[in-house]
Image (tube, rainbow, N blue to C red):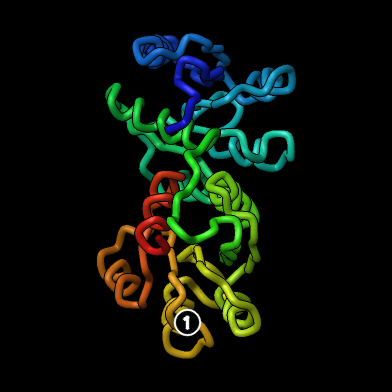
Amino acid sequence: MSVLSVAQLDVLLVEPSATQYKIINEYLQEIGVTAITRVENGAQTLAAIGARVPDLVISAMHLADMTGTELLQTLRNSEHTLDLPFMLISSETHLRYLEPLRQAGVIAILPKPFDQQQLQASLNAVLDFIEPEPLQLGEFAVDELKVLIVDDSFTARHITRHMLEGLGIERFAEAENGRQALQMIDNEFFDLVVTDYNMPEMDGEQLSQLIRSHSTQPSIPVLMVTSETDRARLAGIRHSGVSAIFDKPLTVASLRGALQRLLA
């Protein structure tokens, strides 16, 4: 486990509602988080981060000057805050709001209402993102593994790579879609493929099928990351030859568990 604890977290809480702030603040205090700074909108958030970068931003969805989605996208557009952990607390369920958040590497999305146990689990994911427990693969040398990350979003590829680097993996290649990934697989050896599902030109399901049937590395483990909820589509993904399917947002713990199961 990480030696970092929730008591050491410096949290910036973006919450315009005094009532919601009181609820969230009390939960955080009960869990052990004491360094909590409140701001009420996106402009105040960016100003506060400009003065001091926190360990974690926890934000509501609807702010006076922007949405939580727009706030996260703004943070991801700066090298200074590209890896800053971001948690959303919202009753919003519309894909139009949530999918861009998942693509931008949100650490957790908590519903309203949520309980203390859900908040604790999300904070644990934050700790694992900041200071992950190293990956143990028995006789395998983790730093010698080569991973191909496939996603049309630069930010999503970066966050996935950041998680894998935290586990001790050092060798990477990246592709923007399945077609490009297949060409790379035919020319380079990889120990693992981590791919998004929804991509232009060739999606993750097609990529997995073609890896299994027409590539030079048909047995390579393929990890699929998706926010898909349609049962028929999920069934198609499972039958495409993927080794594991992950819901978005992806967590370090789920990655670690899958890699230990597939590669150890």
Residue at 30% x, 76% y is 239
Q: Is residue 36 above or below residue 64?
A: above
Give the camera-side residue of 232 and 146: 146
In the displayed structure image, the side of residue 172 where residue 21 appears, left or right? left
Residue at 43% x, 52% y is 255
Quadrant, the N terminus:
top left
Q: Can residue 216 be seen from the camera position used here?
A: yes
Give the camera-side residue of 65 and 39: 39
Q: Quadrant of residue 234?
A: bottom left
Q: Quadrant of residue 227?
A: bottom left
Q: Can residue 74 be seen from the camera position used here?
A: no
Give the camera-side residue of 250 and 73: 250
Q: Is residue 57 above or below residue 28?
A: below
Give the camera-side residue of 48 and 125: 125
Residue most toward the front?
139
The residue pinned by badge 1 equals 211
Residue at 51% x, 87% y is 215
Q: Is residue 233 above or below residue 163?
A: below
**Label 1: few (<14), some (14–19) or many (≥20) C-alpha neighbours in 10 Å:** many
Residue type at numbered disc 1: Ile
Whole-percent x, y for residue 16 in the image: 50, 17
Indicate the secondary structure of the residue bearing disc 1: helix
Quadrant, the C terminus:
bottom left
Whole-percent x, y for residue 54 in the image: 61, 22
